[in-house]
Image (cartoon, rainbow, N blue to C red):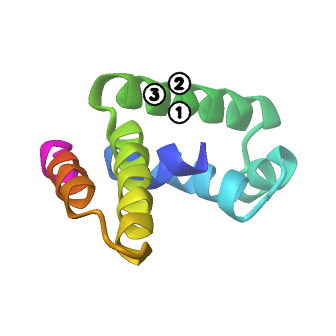
Amino acid sequence: MNFLYDFYQSLLTDKQRSYMHLYYLDDHSLGEIADEYEISRQAVYDNIRRTEAMLEEYEEKLKLLEKFQQRQLVMNQLQQVIQAEPINQELASELIEMLKESD
């Protein structure tokens, strides 16, 4: 959920961002968030669950996290190829092409 939040937080409202930040990044409890905003724990819980569903829906449609993870995998493979002796230039070129195509 933290990764989804990182990628899609700009699509959330200020209130959604605040609840998610407090809950996931600052590790506040539902009760602490409820006290801070003077609302019920259930209201905080409902808002966080709806926001989580929205983030998952954004990822399902946009695939930003999935693409990022795929690029990370290819970059790690490329780094291993570059560090190997001798360098497999053909494989390095293929991995570079994969990175170019992943945009």
- Dot 3 corresponds to which residue? 54
Residue 51's disc number: 1
Relative depth, front residue between 26 and 83: 83
Q: CA distance from mark 3 to mark 2?
A: 4 Å
Relative depth, front residue between 34 and 18: 18
Residue 65, position in %: x, y?
Answer: 41, 42
**Residue 79 in view (yes/no):** yes
Task: Say which residue appears at 30% left-offset and 23% top-offset.
Answer: 61
Compared across the picture, whether 69 is left or right of 86 comes to right
Q: Is residue 62 magenta?
A: no
Compared across the picture, whether 25 is left or right of 5 comes to right
Residue 67, position in %: x, y?
Answer: 33, 41
Secondary structure of the residue carrying tag 1 is helix
Q: Which residues fall within the magenta stretch?
A: 99-103
Secondary structure of the residue carrying tag 3 is helix
Q: Amino acid at mark 3?
A: Met
Q: Dot 1: within a 10 Å radius of its alpha carbon, few (fewer than 14), some, or many (20 or more) residues?
A: many
Instruction: Judge whether 51 appears above or below 95 on screen.
Output: above
